[in-house]
Amino acid sequence: MDNSPLEQLIYQEIALLDQQDFAAWQQLLCDDFHYWIPLRHDQPCPLRESSLLYEDRFLTTLRINRLASARNFSQQPKSRSLHIAQRPAIGLDPDGLSARCLTPMLYCEARGDSEWHYPVTVEHQLLCLAGQWKIQRKKVLLLNPSRAFESLQLII
Amino acid sequence: MDNYFNGKEVHRTLFLDPSLFEREQQQVFAASWCYLGHESLVPETGDFFTADIAGQPLAMVRQKNGEIVVLHNRCPHKGVKVLAEPQGNVGRFIRCPYHAWTFKTDGQLLSIPVKKEYDDCDLSSCAAHKGMQPVAAVENYRGFVFVRLKEQGVGFSEFFGDSLSTLDNMVMRSPQGQLRAIGQPLLHRHRCNWKMVVDNQTDTCHPMVAHESSAGEAIRLWKETGHDGQPPMAVELFSPFMASYEFFSAMGIRTWPNGHGHTGVSNSIHKAYSSIPGYWELMVESYGETQAAAILDDTRHNTVYFPNLMVKGPIQTLRVIRPISACETVVESWIFELVGAPVQLLERTVQYNNLINSPCSMVAHDDVEMYERAMDGLRSQANDWVNVARLFEPGESHEQTQVVSGTSERAMRNFYNTWQQLMQAPDGSTAHG
């Protein structure tokens, strides 16, 4: 199978995130989408130990709504992001309806005079629903997830 | 100037001045009983856990007899920090990686390679001969290990007094009376002075304002999605932040001597969490119905232990507010499992920690923005004072335990009063009592 639609999905995703077009970004997500940033390498489970982030659609929607809130003082001034991505490594499952993608990225976030750079590996679990590839799970592994971070406000 | 706290106001230099920061490391932190870590981090012989207190590297090490010894984490030879990792096991003895000096697990010098070359130097007259020095004042209170770095000073019981009841309650929420620290702490770096974070722990007039964009939006979104019945755990955890002034006022604040205090005397934002199936029965089995009810009915919100520990018993989390410099703080957020309780309690605690204490937490973003803006605003020379006078009572004293309105800033005044006493004490060791 031609993997380019899957690569395009990843590139489209990060472009939408950097444009902060969250309405269009959410169209790429499955209803049971989960977004996870583990607190350590090889963390087996998000439920029984702390994570930097573990969100379902409800929480991700809340995060997006908050970013637009007039009373969101930590977004005055607003943050911007840039995802600098390598080409994804794609592992297609035998049925051709699901895939796992690993994408090394440098995620950059800036606000006011501050700028932060995070080397990450993003693992996407993708699902083909009615001919359309969507993001079911997204796991962001930071190079050093256990260190002390300043506030990280946007979506990696 | 040495009058930084006038009873109702705190001088802005308290938050900005690097030389005050250096002084408070010695006068405040080294003279107080500071939380180092939980004993469950070092369950086996030789296990160690490292942390800094008062800017000094320390390590607690589990001994063969089960006791915990706290060592200054420095080789007596050339000063190398011997135990470099946050946690681990030393093996049968501790070995410095630089010149292979070895030490017993209690820090005593065990061996030096080619030791005869020290024969003529009278090594016993040198500081190096003492090995890795243990901290003399260590207290393991129900698993919580505290140290006082100054050899002389206030005793543990005198320092904490009745405030230990918060730790008692947290421990007794386990049907087996035992807590276990789970995983690594979340570490959130703030560009602010550590005292702003401590101050905020008993500030009950900010949540409904500063957290409107997160907690308020959570309530609105849940209503909008139109579901009936049980809201998701996130809504249950977030929504109490939007409680009214009246709610926070009625929940009460208790202050104890020596700067400790807590919000949530008769009620708290942790009160209305849904019950976890099977937990009540296990508690009744262990404690009987009356005591189990009393334990679970005590839902203290935030307990501040002077100088830099905050404990949330009902949700089994604690924060260590670590000062890095006058303008930099790392907040360490730990979670605990109630040994013998249903695992859903741990799952709720995990969610709470992720949602409230992570560097990615929306609620934390709200708070940190205020601290950092305060650091910026306090550079103004138009007004030297930070105001903590809400519900000040003329002639108020901080020598006794008090219960006051939950919107009072008395717990902050109590904290700054102790801070000032320690800073004014000749060696920081005689101010308590």
Image: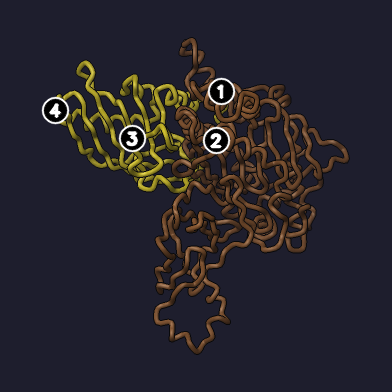
Establish whether labels 4 and 2 are both on one chain. no
The residue lying at 52 percent from left, 48 percent from top is B39
Q: Are marks 4 and 2 in contact (CB under 8 Å)?
A: no
For label 4, the SS is loop
Q: CA distance from mark 2 to mark 3?
A: 27 Å
Outermost residue, left side: A1
In this view, B90 is above or below B419: below
Chain in yellow, by letter, is: A
Q: Amino acid at mark 1?
A: Tyr
Question: Residue B408's image quarter?
Answer: top right
Q: Earlier in the sequence, mark 4 or mark 3?
A: 4
Q: Is residue A86 above or below residue B345?
A: below
Q: Horizontal and vertical percent for residue A101?
A: 24, 35
Between discs 2 and 1, the one toward the N terminus? 1
Residue identified by numbered label 2: B316
Label 4 neighbourhood size at 10 Å, few (<14), some (14-19), many (20+)? few
Identified by mark 3, the residue type is Lys
Q: Nearer the viewer, mark 3 or mark 1?
A: 1
